[in-house]
Amino acid sequence: MFYPAHINLQDRKCLVGGGGTVAERKVVAMLLSGGDVTVISPDATELLTFLANIGTIRWQKRQLKSGDTDGYFLVCAATDFTDINSAVFAEAHDKNKIRLVNVVDVIPQCTFAAASVVTDGEILLSISTSGKSPATSRRIREHLEETLHATSLYTLGYEDGEPVSIANQGLPYPVYLLLENRPCVVLCAQKTPAIERRVSLLRQCGASVLCMAPDAAKPHHLEDVFLVIADQSSAVDRFLSTNPPYQGGIDQRRSKGTFIREYLDAPDAGTHFTPDLVIDNNLIISVSARSSTSIDDAKRLHKELTNQFENNGYGAFIEFLGSRRAEILKAFPTPKKRADFFEVLINTVETNNTQPQTCCLGLTNPECSAECLFNWVRHGKLERANTFTSKRLDKALEGC
């Protein structure tokens, strides 16, 4: 399970290595969240070129080289070259201690994963399946776009086929943190429900959690920590201060980067906050409002999504697909062929009707009882689901 966090990117320096369509989506999301974006790549998409020409982003037209990641808050490597992406991660994460680093499609070289995002400009939803089923994440995203009359970040940047400017909408940047064995500190005077919820999430995500009272914390507790959550901002700020009693702050010789942090008493002052969540095993839907005027609408939507997605089989379905994912990835050499297979696998409905039917995934009809993979899994018919998947895999490989 990944930890959901909505990052405050306002005016923070972000680096994207690569200039293709994947890099483009990363840049669009960062700009909507107020990021100060630099792209380094010999080539760039039409939209990225346009944004560079009008001064929205900086584009250094070359390959990445040593030293490029220094000084950034967030780094994303999205080039077509594995060795370059790996070098970016090693420099940014290991040398420069940057906490937020992402190498596209390489989970071991990420401290965070991107999310599917839907927004109407006021309420922002992000969807994650913890990397187990991107196809299911996409189906849920498309369903929410339609039912909420909202927009996906994937559709922004072009109008009538022409690139257009991307404005800072003041939205948070939704990510899912990979916290397995990462040191995290929680500073609280008492364990309120809000604190306990976060501690529980951290532990579910495999983080190494140290929980203590603020007056018991010392500088060494925070020197190499990845994430800090505090009920009072003052409990953390004193360690970052250049004034006594901790003049010089955290030892920058040992930690060039600074941990990401959430303040419960001052959410805007931290680098991230934990949104309201809908959780069903590895399905996580995050809900947040851009401003106080949208909070009530966000709460109503959170309740609706909880009723729709929690304990209705989505977590079990994602877990099943995740259990077969490695086998399927090995069978097909390209991302497109893998994606196509998952689409066929998920969409197929066994029916005697001559008219073909597509699986609704319970999104448009919660009471659907069709003979499909989703219903077999959510009703515990795993043997039938596995047999069906194996037959589909054999059939697909015969056609390769």
Image (cartoon, rainbow, N blue to C red):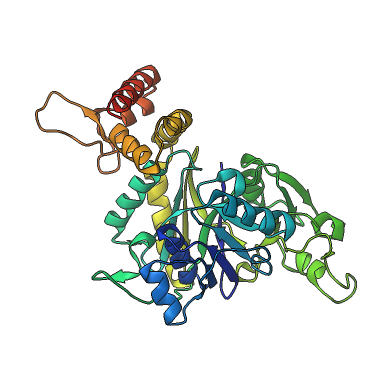
Query: Is residue 191 found left or right of 104 in the rendered image?
Result: right
Instruction: Residue at 70%, 42% (x, y): give it.
Output: 181
Whether residue 271 is visible: no
Residue 197 appears in view: yes
**Residue 365, x across and y down, in percent:** 25, 40
Q: How many marks?
A: 0
Q: Is residue 50 depicted above or below 15 in this figure?
A: below
The residue lying toward the viewer, choosing from 97 and 59, is: 59
Residue 66 placement, left or right of 38: right
The outermost residue toward the bottom is 54
Q: Nearer the viewer, residue 364 or 191?
A: 364
User: Image quadrant of residue 235?
Assistant: bottom right
Residue 389 in the image: above or below residue 217:
above
**13, 8: nearer the viewer:** 13
> Furthest residue to the left?
354
Q: Quadrant of the N terminus?
A: top right
Q: Which image quadrant: the C terminus?
A: top left
* Furthest-right residue in this view: 245
**Residue at 86% from the left image edge and 72% from the top image edge:** 248
Q: Is residue 76 left or right of residue 399?
A: right
Q: Is residue 12 above or below residue 141?
A: below
Where residue 65 sits in the image (x, y, percent)?
A: 63, 63
Residue 199, percent from left and from top: 67, 47
Q: Where is residue 39? Give x, y as percent.
A: 52, 69
Foreground of the two, 56 or 188 = 56
Displayed quadrant of residue 222: bottom right
